[in-house]
Amino acid sequence: MNEGLWAAMDRAESYQRRGAHGAAIEAWRDVLTEDPMIAHAHAGLANSLFEERRIVGARSEASRALELDAENTLALLVLALCDFFENRRKQAIARLDEVLAVDPLNVEALQIKSQFLRDKGDWQGAEDAINEALGIWPGNRASLLEQARVAHSRGRLDEAEAQVRELVSEDPYNVGALALLGEIRRDRGDIDEAWHLAMSALSIDANNVQALDLLGGVKLSRNLIGGMYWHIARFLRRLGNRWLLWFAWGLWLGYMMVLSTMHYFEASELVEWLFIAAYLAFGLGIYANRLLVERIVRKELRKFRMSSDY
């Protein structure tokens, strides 16, 4: 490989590390124009394409990287992320297990596996994965943040808050830590501190999804009706996908049992319709809550961007 090609790869990786994925895509394509047989360049391009949410291209480039190098762990990670993004959760975790079979010390794969399992509602599996990552690299801040998220998901608020406050003290610009600390303070009823933490996170990264969700949740927490629906939606989200279907089934079964009981006791048609209306209001309220959060976030960001210290 000539020096020019090495320099082009270094440039692409530099863009990628800085989060300039649009520039990284062009740089990786320059590399591949010179030599289309470099698996690492295809994997790097796949990673940047995924960060830009260009899923079809990311999957294609990752697959090409694996054709050239069947054990390319970056390409496998990108495919795992694509699978998860497209709601193929089991396949995503299986891909991560492939990565770990090739490289058992891959901390990033263990971090992502913990996140996937946490989303699924497998708290113990998530905790085992992130503890394994910390066993390999004890001081890794991304792993420590994920460990705090797992503790938060399991309701261990004291433990989660202590961990995340330490991360913020070490790195006041850690957006994920600021947003998680805001979630914990909001859960404990300290809405003012949660709002300030959301604003601090957004002043660093105005597009951070977790901070935006926190901002919407904080605003809704101050609203009696919207706050009620927000807490219900949050409860359903924290159940995880595995238990959410059981919850929905139980809710539907309870609904049918109440209707049957009404028929048995010959309740008036008005009572039946009121019950149906309440059931529909619950379902539609959860959906409307998401729209309300997005509206609140957009309104708050417009105000925030007008401030002199933005």
Image (cartoon, rainbow, N blue to C red):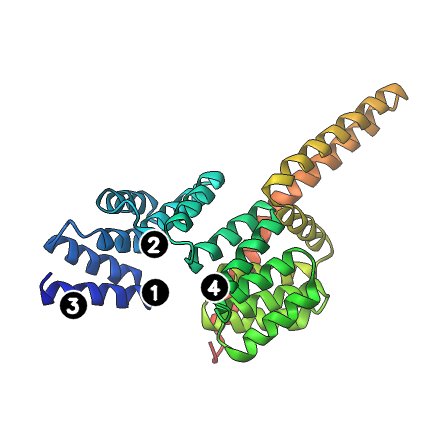
Residue positioned 43% across, 41% down in the render: 86
**Figure quadrant of the N terminus:** bottom left
Disc 2 from disc 3: Cα separation? 24 Å
Q: Categorize mark 1 by other alpha carbons within 10 Å: few (<14), some (14-19), many (20+).
A: few
Residue positioned 51% across, 60% down in the render: 298
Residue 7 found in image quarter = bottom left
Disc 4 from disc 1: Cα separation? 26 Å
The location of residue 21, given as percent across then percent down, is: 30, 60
Residue kind at label 2, given as amino acid type? Glu
Label 2 sits on a secondary structure element that is loop
Disc 2 from disc 4: Cα separation? 30 Å
Q: Nearer the viewer, residue 305 or 88?
A: 88
Label 4 sits on a secondary structure element that is helix
The residue that label 4 is drawn on is 136
Disc 1 from disc 3: Cα separation? 19 Å
The location of residue 149, given as percent across then percent down, is: 59, 60
The location of residue 234, given as percent across then percent down, is: 65, 51
Quick one: label 4 or label 1, which is nearer the N terminus? Answer: 1
Residue 229: mark? none
The residue that label 3 is drawn on is 7
Please tell me how many numbered marks the rendered image carries: 4
Residue positioned 53% across, 60% down in the render: 210
Quick one: label 2 or label 3, which is nearer the N terminus? Answer: 3
**Residue 200 vertical placement versus 62 (above, below):** below
Q: Nearer the viewer, mark 2 or mark 3?
A: 3
Q: Residue furthest right?
A: 265
The residue that label 1 is drawn on is 19
Quick one: label 1 or label 3, which is nearer the N terminus? Answer: 3
